[in-house]
Image (spheres, rainbow, N blue to C red):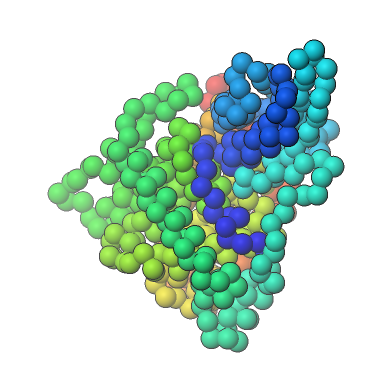
Amino acid sequence: MESLKELYRIGRGPSSSHTIAPTKAAELFAEENPAAARFKVTLYGSLSKTGRGHMTDTAILDVLGHEKCEIVFSDKPDEELPHPNTMVFEAFAVDGGAMALMEVYSVGGGRIVIKGRPAEKARDVYKLSTFGEIKAYCEQNHMRICDYVYETEGESIKEYLTAIWQRMKQTIEAGLAAEGILQGGLEVQRKARYLYRQNHIDESPQTRENRLVCAFAYAVSEENADGGIIVTAPTCGASGVLPATLYYMQQHRRLPDEKIIDALATAGIIGNLIKTNASISGAECGCQAEVGSACSMAAAGLAELFAMEIDQIEYAAEVAMEHHLGLTCDPISGLVQIPCIERNAVAAMRAINALSLANFLTHTRKISFDVVIKTMYETGRDLFSKYRETSEGGLAKTYFE
């Protein structure tokens, strides 16, 4: 498996597949064609159907030039595409002659693959690629999952995760301070600040926990939806779940950053296992691959915070993913707003619920985390394309009926 640096990335929202990856592709194409007089970029599949809502066109134009670049949203049938997130870049000379063409696939998590070139693939640093293997290794060597991360990647990964955590906190704080309407046309009001500032005298501890966790998740997701800077965890669309739960627990229990770094390391292994053995792409496997994966990461991270046994960490991650199986990706108007923002908040609360179940029922479980990863991938591949980030089904369709 790859380094956690490939999973946790700081970038521009609202979508790792729709903005971070296209930005990277546009930067590469511009670098390779400095003499081009104009550009044309054709978006296919999910990038075409939800590209406007996901700001794909804006991300590319910001790099290639709003005056020099033409964006085309193709209606080519999905079944004819090599990948559901396909884009074709063309460069032209002053006289109109074609200079270069580059076909690119946005494969999730901000990663791109270019047709005809060696796949952009980071070096595998983890020899073990299933939870079962990692669990056996950790038990044999009397170490926790986070220790396995530090042993494998070296102490420098702690510095990287520290920077990731600082960015997560900055995004939460920015979201809590912001007010107004999110761009995109749905007139969605920012709610994080409102949720956070509510203060009822008779509020129960449980209600307060739910309100604050939701406020933090809304804060990140609203920043993401508005094109702000976030951390993929594992994606932009699911970026609110993990930081919300960790931020709440750090404040509630006055935990030092060192404990949060351990939790991020453990959560990262969970995300890496899903990315390696299944998918974290909504266009490939629906929202179960994004918010479901984020919930699973958060549950495992919380279990690490509470120093739970490795079996309990596995159970927390498994419960969180199992009860997101079949979750569709159906953003209204292609915007990462409805149901995406609220869904991050619900998943954050569900991660805490999974933690509680792991605390009580671990030794009664029947399903391993490796099995639920495989099941999620098979389920995602069986979903109709209209429920995989195309905005052609579900809420995206019925909202306007």
Residue 36: quarter of image: top right
Residue 219: quarter of image: top left
Horizontal relation, residue 115 to residue 396: left or right: right
State the residue lying farthest toward the front: 35
**175 vs 134: above or below:** above
- Asked if residue 388 can be seen in this view, the reply is no
The number of callouts visible is: 0
List x then y, in percent, for residue 304: 45, 70
List x then y, in percent, for residue 70: 68, 18
- Residue drawn 68% across and 72% down? 128
- Residue drawn 52% across and 76% down? 147
Horizontal relation, residue 70 to residue 236: left or right: right
- Residue drawn 61% across and 55% down? 6
**392 vs 121: above or below:** above
- Residue drawn 57% across and 27% down? 62
**53 vs 142: above or below:** above
**37 vs 263: above or below:** above
Residue 390: quarter of image: top right
- In terms of depth relative to the viewer, which is nearer, 237 or 163? 163
- In terms of depth relative to the viewer, which is nearer, 6 or 31? 31
Image quarter in which the C terminus is found: top right
State the residue lying farthest toward the top: 95
List x then y, in percent, for residue 150: 53, 72
List x then y, in percent, for residue 273: 64, 63
- Asked if residue 211 can be seen in this view, the reply is yes
Image quarter in which the N terminus is found: bottom right
